[in-house]
Amino acid sequence: MRIRSASGRYQVRMAPGLLDLLTVQPGNRLLVADERFADRLGGLPAVLVPATEDTKTMAGAERVVAALRKVGCNRASTLVAVGGGVVQDVAAFAASIYMRGIPWIYAPTTLLAMADSCIGGKSSINVAGQKNLVGTVHPPAEVLIDPDLTLTLDVEQRVAGLCEAAKICFARGPRAFDRYMVVSIDPACDGANLAPVIALSLASKKWFIEVDEFDRNERLLLNFGHTFGHAIEDASGFQVSHGVAVGLGMLVALELAQLQGARLGANALRLHRHVLELLHYLPFPPCRQSRLDPDRLLAAFDKDKKHSREAYAVIIPDDSDRLTRRLLPRDQATRQAIGRSFAAVLHMP
Ligand SMILES: NC(=O)c1ccc[n+]([C@@H]2O[C@H](COP(=O)([O-])OP(=O)(O)OC[C@H]3O[C@@H](n4cnc5c(N)ncnc54)[C@H](O)[C@@H]3O)[C@@H](O)[C@H]2O)c1
Ligand SMILES: [Zn+2]
C-alpha cells in the first residue's frame, strides 16, 4: 500500500520475516526499540526503551536525540523504530526534531500499531502529566509490518488492537464495517492470522489521512472513543491500556449519543455488542485495581485538548450510524450526561 502525505508518498509492506530483513541492512542508522526485542536487532546500534507511558516524554525523546548525536547521525541518517505505539511516538517525535527532521522507518510490533498507528504520521508525547499534549506530524519513510510478530501478543493486546481496528472500520462506513466483522478474529485464538484485519483497517484509515492529514475535518472522526478513552487511561493511572480504553470509550460515546437523543442504528448496535464481546475476553475486568473515581474521570475528560473554551467536542454516531462531531455546551447538564455515560459503562455508583 502507498500512502500520500504532504511530505511525499511512503510505502507500507506486510510480509513475514520483514523484521529480520530490516536488522541486517547496513547503513547510517540508529534503532530505537522496545527492550523486549533486544536479542532480535542483530548488533546494530540501538536505544532500548521500556514500552511504558514514561518513555514517551520529553526526557525519553531527549535520550533518543542524545543517542543519535552520540553515534554520529546526521541529516542523511535514518532512525529505525521497532515496537508498539510507545516506541513509535518517542522515535517519530525524536526523528521529527533532530536536526529539524531526519527520515525514520517503522516496524510496528503490536496489533494496535500495525492496524492503526503506523500510518498517519502523528507523534505524541506526554507532558506535564497530560497524555499526548505535545506532538508533530512526521510520516515515516517506510512501514514494514511483520505479521508473525503478533504471535507473541497476549489476549489484552489483541483486544486492544481489535478495538482500534473496529473503530476505524465503523468510522469508514457500512461496507468497511461489514468486512471487518467478517475478518475479525477470536482474540483468544493463539496463532490466528491477523493479516486480513490489519490490511482492511489500514486501507480504511488511508482514506482519512489522505483526505485530511492535519486533523481538521474528516480525520477528527477517528477520535471516536478517544476523548473518553484518554480520561479512562488517565483516571486509572494508565492501568487500562490505550486500545482497551478506546473500546470502553466507544461504549461511553454510544451511551452519550443516546442521552443526546440519538437512536442507535443497526451497525452502532453491532459495534456495541462486538466491543462488549471483545472486552469479555480480558482476563480481568478492564478497570481492575482502580475503582475509577468519577471526579477524576470528569476532570480528565474536561482537560482534553480537543475541547474549546465554550464547548466539549465529542464524536458520536447519528441515527444512521454516521459519526458526527458534536459541540456540547460546557455546562452542568452536559457534565451530568457525560458522568452518567461513564457510570453506565464502568458501573460506577
Ligand atoms: N501516534 C499515533 O498515531 C498513536 C495512535 C494510537 C496509539 N498511540 C499510542 O500508542 C501507545 C500504545 O501502544 P501499543 O498498544 O501499540 O503498545 P505499547 O507500545 O504500549 O506496548 C504494549 C505492551 O506490548 C509489548 N509488546 C510489544 N510488541 C510485542 C510483541 N510482538 N509481542 C509481545 N508483546 C509485545 C510491549 O513490550 C508492552 O509490554 C499509547 O501511548 C498510545 O497513546 C499512538
Ligand atoms: Zn488510539
Image (cartoon, grey):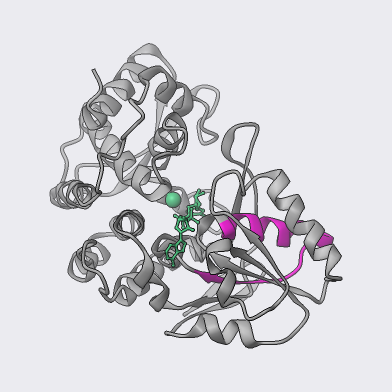
Q: Nearer the viewer, residue 30 or 200?
A: 30
Decide if residue 24 is in sight here.
yes
Magenta portion: prevailing SS class: helix
Q: Is residue 62 left or right of residue 273?
A: right
- The answer to whether residue 296 is above or below residue 177 is above
Q: Residue at x 59, y 83 (%)?
A: 22
Magenta residue span: 87-108
Q: Nearer the viewer, residue 264 or 250?
A: 250
Q: Residue at x 41, y 22 (%)?
A: 298
- The answer to whether residue 109 is above or below residue 278 is below
Q: Position of residue 261 (x, y in %)?
A: 20, 29
Instruction: Kindly indicate the quadrant of the structure image that contains residue 132.
Output: top right
- The answer to whether residue 28 is above or below residue 150 is below
Instruction: Kindly indicate the quadrant of the structure image that contains residue 309.
Output: top right
Q: Position of residue 150 (x, y in %)?
A: 38, 70
Q: Position of residue 115 (x, y in %)?
A: 40, 65
- The answer to whether residue 79 is above or below residue 34 is below
Q: Residue at x 78, y 75 (%)?
A: 77
Q: Is residue 1 left or right of residue 181?
A: right
Instruction: Kindly indicate the quadrant of the structure image that contains residue 292.
Output: top left
Q: How many marks?
A: 0
Residue farthest toward the front in the current orientation of the protein: 39
Decide if residue 122 is in sight here.
no
